[in-house]
Image (spheres, rainbow, N blue to C red):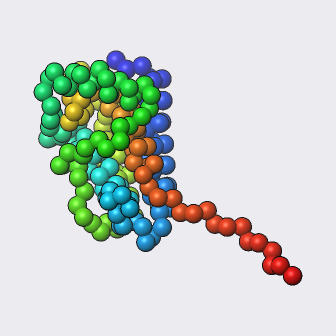
């Protein structure tokens, strides 16, 4: 059974991560929403779609459908859990360049901003509600492609970290300049 206070902290952090991502995504300038980043990485729209697909995959698993397929064998999975996952959750860091599996790679777009963000909010909310409802049921877990089965608390914490990782990749609009007094 998961401690209620720990769950509330993780659930609040997850909800705040989603809200912060959506706020930051809405602040992306229109001309940059569907534009690939200069380093050839995903556009802000593709990042939002990637997150939506991630939550849809996790939610489907919680509903008894197909979720993520584990991509590594038991020995490598144990090693990754003991090293990478442990460090991620303790230090709140997400490794740069972590690969996205096929089921959560976004298409080329374009993606309409409000529809994509509404889809993300809906999938993240449905995932959170379903995980909360099942968190104390025996055998409840979410599957990660490289870490395997995670308990509900680990899954929720990793989701928040994943969202924060991608929020940091969004371009921010320059702050509006203060009007300067005209020189006489």
User: Does 56 appear above or below 63?
Assistant: below
Observer-nearest of 100 and 112? 100
Q: Residue furthest bottom?
A: 184
Q: Position of residue 121 (x, y in %)?
A: 38, 52
**Which residue is pictured at 15% across the width and 31% down the height?**
72
Observer-nearest of 5 and 67? 67
Specify the quadrant of the image occupied by residue 71. Answer: top left
Q: Position of residue 181 (x, y in %)?
A: 81, 74
**Which residue is pictured at 42% across the width and 52% down the height?**
169
User: Does 43 appear above or below 94?
Assistant: below
Specify the quadrant of the image occupied by residue 44. Answer: bottom left
Residue 135 visible somewhere in the drawing: no
Q: Position of residue 23 (x, y in %)?
A: 49, 55
Residue 61 visible somewhere in the drawing: yes
Q: Is residue 11 left or right of residue 67?
A: right
Observer-nearest of 152 and 37? 37
> Which quarter shows the C terminus?
bottom right
Q: Is residue 68 left or right of residue 45?
A: left
Q: Position of residue 86 (x, y in %)?
A: 35, 24
**Which residue is pictured at 24% across the width and 29% down the height?**
147
Q: Residue furthest front?
A: 39
User: Does 103 appear above or below 61?
Assistant: below
């Amino acid at each position: 059974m998961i401690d209620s206070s720990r769950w509330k902290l993780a659930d609040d952090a997850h909800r705040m991560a989603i809200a912060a991502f959506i706020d930051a995504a809405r602040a992306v300038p229109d001309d940059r929403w569907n534009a690939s980043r200069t380093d050839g990485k995903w556009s802000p729209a593709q990042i939002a779609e990637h997150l939506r697909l991630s939550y849809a995959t996790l939610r489907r698993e919680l509903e008894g459908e197909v979720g993520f397929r584990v991509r590594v064998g038991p020995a490598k999975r144990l090693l990754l859990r003991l090293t990478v996952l442990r460090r991620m959750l303790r230090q709140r860091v997400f490794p740069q360049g972590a690969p996205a599996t096929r089921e959560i790679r976004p298409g080329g777009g374009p993606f309409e901003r409000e529809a994509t963000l509404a889809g993300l909010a809906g999938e993240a909310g449905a995932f959170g509600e379903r995980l909360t409802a099942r968190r104390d049921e025996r055998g409840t877990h979410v599957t990660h492609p490289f870490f395997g089965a995670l308990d509900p608390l680990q899954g929720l914490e990793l989701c928040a970290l994943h969202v924060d990782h991608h929020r940091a990749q969004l371009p921010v609009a320059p702050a509006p300049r203060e009007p300067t007094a005209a020189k006489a």
